[in-house]
Image: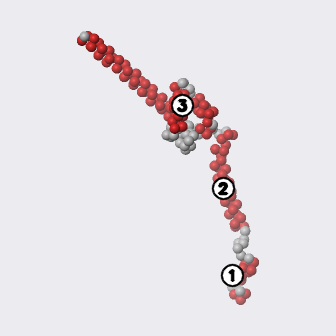
Amino acid sequence: MIKKFFLFTAYSFFLSLSFLSTAEQSSELSADFQEKVKSISAELRCLVCQNQTIADSNASLAVDLRNQVSRMLRQGKSEQEIKQYMVERYGDFVLYDPPVKERTWALWFGPFLLLALAIAFLVSNQLKRRAEPDSALNSADREDLRALLRGDKDQL
């Protein structure tokens, strides 16, 4: 009976040691894996928040997308394949840094175009204001002002 107990204890000890070493290896792989998931997630935009990456967002869609990235990495897909899948499914907007192409010109050049239009409007408005005489005065009022400036108080 003591022999069986001793053998069982030794077997349990060695078995727990083997689990410990595999757990350490899997945690190292897990840390690298999690870093890879976080790296890819940092390049994808949260479609709900739109101002955060899916790595930073706690929205349920962002969590689902992170899980999907993790699942695709476990399936052996590359980072490029994962991004391509996300773009095919959600469009270029899902990329936090979308490529410059015809479909994304509005994203890249739209703000600059609006700024240029606003500046052009302000400049043209100022030029018109300077070119136009003060229309609040009629011709009689203008003559009275000229007379005051010349010092002709008798004409008033």
Residue type at mark 2?
Ala
Mark before the other along the chain sequence, 3 or 1: 3
Give the class, few, some or many, for how many residues have Cα within 10 Å of label 1's Cα (few <14, many ≥20).
few
Label disc, if present, on residue 68 of the rendered structure? 3
Q: Which residue is mark 1?
A: 149
Residue 126 is situated, as x and y percent measured from the top left of the image, at 68, 63
Q: Residue at x 51, y 36 (%)?
A: 63
- Horizontally, residue 93 falls left or right of residue 131, namely left
Q: Quadrant of the C terminus?
A: bottom right
Q: Amino acid at mark 1?
A: Leu
The answer to whether residue 77 is seen in the rendering is yes
Indicate whether 109 appears above or below 29. below
- Read off the residue under disc 2: 118
Q: Is residue 27 above or below residue 155?
A: above
Which residue is at 54% across, 28% downward? Answer: 72
Q: Is residue 109 above or below residue 91?
A: below
Residue at (56%, 37%) from the top-left corner?
Answer: 44
Q: Note whether residue 146 is visible.
A: no
Q: Helix, strand, or loop for circle 3?
A: helix
If you read the primary sequence from the N terminus, does the residue marked by circle 2 or circle 1 appear first? Answer: 2
Q: Tell me if mark 2 has few (under 14), some (14-19) or many (20+) residues whose alpha carbon lies within 10 angstroms of its own.
A: few
